[in-house]
Image (tube, rainbow, N blue to C red):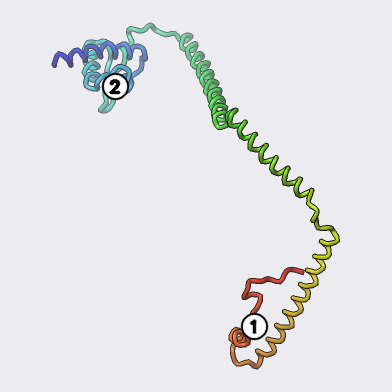
Amino acid sequence: MSKGRAEAVAGASGILLRYLEEQNRPYSAQDVFGNLQREHGLGKAAVVKALDQLAQQGKIKEKMYGKQKIYFADQEQFDMVSDADLQALDAKIVALTAKVQSLQQSCRHMEAELKELTSALTTPEMQKEIQELKKECAGYTERLKTIKAATNHVTPEEKEQVYRERQRYCKEWRKRKRMATELSDAILEGYPKSKKQFFEEVGIETDEDYNLKLPDP
């Protein structure tokens, strides 16, 4: 083993031993490498070699699970834990779990509030919006004044007169259209060609030719 590699393994050994004792749970070499690589910049080969050396020295334990080797701290170095201590730890875990859930809920509320505040208008933007709305309202107010001041308003009597004339013209339109239709139908009974050809030869133009529709009564 080269001097540089030996130093890397030696440096990794202390880090790995301390990590396994602090965590006190089983890890594969890949797990340890993934958890510590970013913080300590350990190479995977150095991690594997250091774990094997620690196991050979009896400082940690190793077990095979299928094709994978698992490493964990030597349990004999830890004090025996009584049932009462375990129950106390369980209660502490429950309390801490509830606290974490409460904090997560508070974080979600604060994130929602922050999102709402971020999407809201700033004070300068609101002031600009208010000025634009005031300007728009002033324009409508001026327009309303102009309309009220006009002298050419249509009186109710004039409006009623227009409606009556419209009804009269529509009635006449409907009457004449019916008469023309009845007359053309009578002619077409003895006409050897189609209705379209008859209208073209005579020069008759229909409402439909100009997309006109008779208003409802």
Image coordinates for residue 31, horizontal then vertical, percent: 31, 23
Front-most of residues 24 and 149: 149
Disc 1 or 2, which lies upstream in sequence? Answer: 2
Furthest residue to the right?
Answer: 157
Kindly report which numbered mark, 1 or 2, lies closer to the viewer in this rendering. Answer: 1
Image coordinates for residue 101, horizontal then vertical, percent: 53, 22
Label 1: which secondary element: loop
Front-most of residues 99 and 26: 99
Label 2: which secondary element: helix
Number of marks in picture: 2
Which label number is shown at residue 204? 1
Q: Is residue 101 left or right of residue 30?
A: right
Q: Which residue carries the number 2 mark?
A: 33
Front-most of residues 83 and 200: 200
Q: Is residue 133 left or right of residue 60?
A: right
Image coordinates for residue 112, horizontal then vertical, percent: 56, 29
Q: Residue at x 59, y 90 (%)?
A: 193
In the picture, the quarter occupied by the N terminus is top left
144 versus 114 height, above or below: below
In the picture, the quarter occupied by the C terminus is bottom right
Classify residue 126 by image quadrant.
Answer: top right
Disc 2 marks a residue whose amino acid type is Phe
Classify residue 131 by image quadrant.
Answer: top right
Spatial separation of the CA atoms under disc 1 and disc 2: 95 Å
